[in-house]
């Protein structure tokens, strides 16, 4: 399985850690932190519901 990176400069997808066109470091378009934020969002909502009752 290949990792896919995205160039923040030209928005091209590449399998390399730097863009061959722009020579800048590419980013992972779907970083793992999004799932962590969703998890914390769920707990935040649960906590809020508890406090409102
Ligand atoms: Zn680029």
Image (cartoon, rainbow, N blue to C red):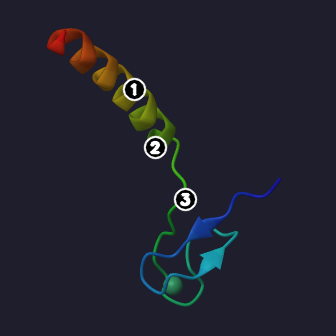
Q: Which badge, 3 or 1, is on the more N-terminal residue?
A: 3
Left or right: 53 in relation to 32: left
Residue shown at 66% from the left, 75% from the top: 14
Residue that badge 1 annotates? 42
Q: Which badge, 2 or 3, is on the more N-terminal residue?
A: 3
Indicate if the residue with disc 1 has its beta carbon within 8 Å of ligand 1.
Answer: no
Q: Are marks 2 and 1 in contact (CB under 8 Å)?
A: no
Give percent across and percent down for residue 40.
37, 27
Residue 51, relative to residue 12: is it above or below? Answer: above
Tag in front: 2 or 3: 2
Residue shown at 22% from the left, 20% from the top: 48
Of 51 and 2, which appears nearest the observer? 51
> Quadrant location of the C terminus?
top left
Give percent across and percent down for residue 22.
48, 87
Left or right: 23 in relation to 45: right
* Residue 34 in view here: yes
Residue that badge 2 annotates? 34
Residue 40, relative to residue 29: is it above or below? Answer: above
Of 38 and 7, which appears nearest the observer? 38
Residue shown at 45% from the left, 40% from the top: 33
Indicate if the residue with disc 2 has its beta carbon within 8 Å of ligand 1.
Answer: no
Q: How many marks?
A: 3
- Inter-mark Cα distance, 3 to 1: 24 Å
Tag in front: 3 or 1: 1
Residue that badge 3 annotates? 28
Q: Secondary structure at mark 3?
A: loop
Query: Going by the picture, which residue comes out furthest to the front?
Result: 53
């Amino acid at each position: 399985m290949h990792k896919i990176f995205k160039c923040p400069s030209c928005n091209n997808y590449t399998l390399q850690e730097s863009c061959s066109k722009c020579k800048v470091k590419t980013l992972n378009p779907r970083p793992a932190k999004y799932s962590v934020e969703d998890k914390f969002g769920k707990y935040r909502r649960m906590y809020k519901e508890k406090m409102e009752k």
